[in-house]
Structures are given as C-alpha cells and as structure tokens.
C-alpha cells in the first residue's frame, strides 16, 4: 500500500488547490524504486498465492521426469525454492504434509512418493528451520492418518529427519509408535521411538523370534549401518545370533546362517562367539543340519582367533 500511494503521488503530484507539488528527494525516490522492484516487479508470477497448488500440480504432471531425489532437488531449487517466502514455505510444508501423511485417496496415493520426496528436499534444505516450523505449529502437524500408506510414510519420513518426532504432540506420537511396532521392518527404522540407539537395539533384540523372522534384508542392512555409526554393531549382532540359533528347521537354519552369520562371523567378538556356539549346541536344527559341515568351520576359525 505504501508503494501504491507513492506511485499515485509521483503520477499525480498536485497535493492541493494551491498547486503544491510532491517533490521527493533523491534518497526517497531511489528507495521507492528499489522497494517496487524487490517487492513486486522482480517476483516471478509463480510466487503468487497459488504457488503451492501450482507446485503440487507441477510435480504430479512431471513425476515420470523426476525419478530420483537428485533430479527433483535440482528442479525444485531452480523453479521454486530459491525465492520462497517464509509464509509460502510454511503453506507448502502444510500442504505436502497433508497429502503425504493424512490423505488416502486415488490422487494422494498416486502422488505420495513424489510429494514425500519433495517434502524431504524442503527439509534437507534447512532442517533447523523446518523443525522449528513444525514445533511452532505442532497441533496442525500432529494430525495424521489412522493407518495404511500415510502412516507408513510418516514412520519412514521421521526416520530420515532427525528431531521431528519430538516436536509433535501425543496426538501423532501415540498412533505412530503403535503402528511402527506392528511391523518389524518399520520398527527397525523407527529408532526415534527410544531415547537412544542402544535402547532401540535392546528393544529389537528382546522381541520374539517369530516377529524378528520377518525382518527383510534391506531393513537388516539399514539397521547394521546405523548400528555401526552408533558404535552398537556388536549389540546388533545379537539379533543375528538369536535368529540363527532359534531356527525351527534345517531349511530355516540354512537361510539364517547365510543371511545373518556367514557375512559377519569374522567380526563377532568373544561374547557373540560364546552366544552363537552355545546356541548351536542347544538346537538340533542348527548342529545336525547337512550344511553345518561346511558352515560351522567358519565359526571354528573365528573361535580359534
């Protein structure tokens, strides 16, 4: 409005019937020009009130051309994020959050992956600012779906974005925690449910073998990578030992040894070696299986070391 009034004064400078003129000094004129340029004239049309809906529609139309996070990041940065106003940024995060974590319909389901990757790009661009926005609007962002794909998506998103879970209210925390614990592969990712990664490993290693046995290779490898970073790899190997030594059949034991023991036996410390050797001796399905003749010498060699 101030720029608008200055424009009228400049175009129609007569102020009264006495024909007094508006005569801005040089500094005022320069400031008016600069403010007009920065506030209005240099803003691309895309940064209007419709920026968020334009962005979401654009992503839906171009998702086949943006197959990975790297290409999506470059596209968003070039076209949208460089000049994003804080108010528009908050509205963008709210909209993507709703489409990713609250809605389940044909459109939301079809575009959940591209929207989730876009939300991750916005987070990674300034994680501290992102986390503060969530904290300041915690009640709004704590509205999540009751289950299904949206809740799966938020469990995994929070695993990639440190500190977001703690900013939410119990309206989100309670269903997220309960849902994550229904699936071992989700739970392995959701280390934020515990106060420390050590506590997370302790929870996992204490689960029944029946639940641990559905652990996927991808989830296991991701857990090991995090455990290595947290200096908790030997504790993670307790899960491997438990899965092998509790095998309920020869075929199960063959598979468990191949997945959880053979690749890591050379890293087992004395405590893990004692556990695996005692477990083998107490289970006929491990020490009487045919492949034990070729598998167990690997453990013998490590024990000798």
Image: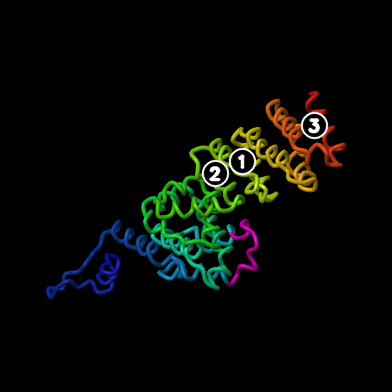
Q: Are marks 3 and 1 in contact (CB under 8 Å)?
A: no
> For mark 1, what is the residue?
226
Measured as percent of width and height from the top left, residue 63 is found at 61, 67
Q: Secondary structure at mark 3?
A: helix
Q: CA distance from mark 2 to mark 1?
A: 9 Å
Name which of mark 2 and mark 1 comes first in the sequence.
2
Position above or below: 238 against 209: above
Q: Are marks 2 and 1 in contact (CB under 8 Å)?
A: yes
Picture disc at residue 299: 3
Measured as percent of width and height from the top left, residue 236 is found at 64, 37
Residue lying furthest bottom: 17
Check the picture and name the quadrant holding the C terminus.
top right
Measured as percent of width and height from the top left, residue 229 is found at 61, 37
Picture disc at residue 147: none
12 with respect to 270 (left or right):
left
> For mark 2, what is the residue?
191
| Nearer to us in this view, 119 or 289 | 289
Q: Residues within 10 Å of mark 1 (few under 14, many from 20)?
A: some
Q: CA distance from mark 2 to mark 3?
A: 31 Å
Asked where in the image residue 48 lies, by quadrant, the reply is bottom left
Predominant secondary structure, magenta span:
helix
Q: Nearer the viewer, mark 2 or mark 3?
A: 3
Q: Secondary structure at mark 2?
A: helix
Position above or below: 155 against 75: above
Position above or below: 218 against 13: above
Q: Residues within 10 Å of mark 2 (few under 14, many from 20)?
A: many
Give the extent of the magenta segment.
61-72
């Amino acid at each position: 409005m101030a720029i608008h009034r200055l424009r009228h004064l400049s175009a129609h400078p007569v102020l009264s019937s006495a024909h007094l003129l508006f005569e801005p000094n040089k500094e005022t004129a320069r400031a008016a020009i600069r403010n007009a340029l920065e506030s209005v004239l240099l803003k691309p049309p895309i940064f209007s009130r419709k920026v968020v809906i334009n962005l979401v529609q654009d992503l839906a139309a171009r998702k086949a051309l943006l197959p990975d996070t790297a290409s999506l990041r470059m596209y968003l940065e070039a076209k949208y994020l460089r000049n994003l106003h804080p108010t528009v940024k908050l509205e963008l995060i709210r909209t993507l959050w709703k489409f990713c974590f609250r809605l389940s319909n044909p459109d939301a389901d079809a575009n959940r992956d591209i929207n989730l990757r876009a939300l991750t790009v916005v987070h990674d661009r300034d994680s501290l600012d992102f986390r503060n926005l969530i904290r300041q609007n915690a009640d709004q962002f704590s509205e999540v779906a009751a289950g299904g794909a949206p809740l799966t998506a938020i469990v995994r998103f929070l695993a990639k974005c440190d500190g977001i879970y703690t900013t939410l209210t119990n309206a989100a925390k309670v269903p997220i925690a309960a849902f994550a614990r229904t699936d071992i592969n989700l739970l392995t990712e959701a280390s934020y449910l515990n106060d420390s990664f050590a506590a997370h490993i302790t929870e996992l290693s204490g689960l029944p073998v029946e639940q641990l046995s559905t652990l996927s290779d991808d989830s296991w490898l991701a857990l090991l990578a995090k455990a290595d970073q947290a200096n908790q790899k030997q504790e993670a190997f307790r899960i491997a030992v438990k899965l092998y030594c509790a095998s309920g059949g020869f075929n199960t034991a063959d598979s468990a040894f191949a997945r959880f023991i053979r690749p890591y036996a050379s890293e087992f410390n004395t405590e893990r070696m004692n556990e695996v050797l005692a477990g083998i001796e107490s289970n006929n399905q491990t020490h009487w299986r045919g492949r034990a003749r070729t598998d167990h010498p690997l453990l013998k060699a490590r024990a000798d070391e």
